[in-house]
Image (cartoon, rainbow, N blue to C red):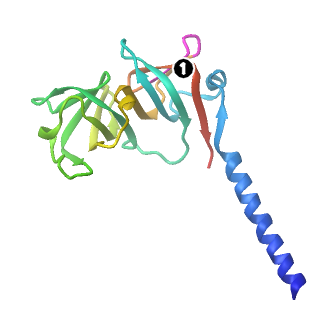
Amino acid sequence: MKANTKWTSSLIAAVFLAMVNTGVAQVGMQKSAADLFKTIKVGQWVELEGTLQSDFSLSTKKVKFLTGDFQDDDWELKGVVKTISPTKKQFTIGRISVLATAESEYESPEGTFKGFADLKTGMLVECEGTFLKDGTFSAEEIQQETDFKPNELNEIRAVGKVEKIDPIKRTVTMMGTTFKIVEATKVQSVVK
């Protein structure tokens, strides 16, 4: 009986180690910023994070390749509200115009963010919705972020499809915004 228990324990340990090693090999693979342009393609879903520059481009901190079955309303945008147009029910994050519709849902941790009238410049928000062909982000959900670090106020995080790639200028364009790839850019590949 001891031999059988020992064999079973060894088998369980081997399976567990194989699962852990496979997971590490597949999730979070790091690539260099130079390798990015060998693998990234127009139309590919990625997550980009960057720091807003004076010309409204972003110095990219992170590029994460995404996999899965994405829908047209799976786009995300997180950043500080720069301008608000109450008559159009629009606001901007960086240069991206965000449209709040009658169906848009509003959320905040405290429950105080209930509608477009509660939106303020300087507020950090995360939006989920669809990026339209006219260059507008149509928000289905707008969530106020209240727990953040001061350096996040100059950052934008976007999830969506790559529109344009320029390996010479080392840029990736998404939602009409230019993300500049720098040597410090971290590149992650996620494989399911």
Quadrant containing the N terminus is bottom right
Helix, strand or loop status at disc 1:
strand
For the point 54% across and 31% down, the residue is: 63
Farthest-out residue, right: 3
For the point 87% across and 85% down, the residue is: 2
For the point 46% across and 33% down, the residue is: 161
Residue 41 image offset from top left, x and y in percent: 57, 28
Query: Circle 1 is placed at which residue position?
Result: 181
| 188 vs 84: above or below | below
Q: Quadrant of residue 181?
A: top right
Farthest-out residue, bottom: 1
Farthest-out residue, front: 150
10 and 179: which is toward the camera? 10
Query: How many C-alpha atoms fall within 10 Å of the one at disc 1: few (<14), some, or many (≥20)?
Result: many
Residue 136 image offset from top left, x and y in percent: 29, 29
| 168 vs 25: above or below | above
Q: Magenta stretch?
A: 167-173
Instruction: Say which amino acid is labelled 1.
Output: Ile
Side of 186 where 48 appears, left or right: left
Residue 167 image offset from top left, x and y in percent: 59, 15
Side of 1 where 124 appears, left or right: left
Q: Is residue 15 magenta?
A: no
Side of 143 where 32 appears, left or right: right
Residue 145 image offset from top left, x and y in percent: 30, 42
Number of callouts in the render?
A: 1
| 6 vs 159: above or below | below
For the point 65% across and 35% down, the residue is: 30
181 and 173: which is toward the camera? 181
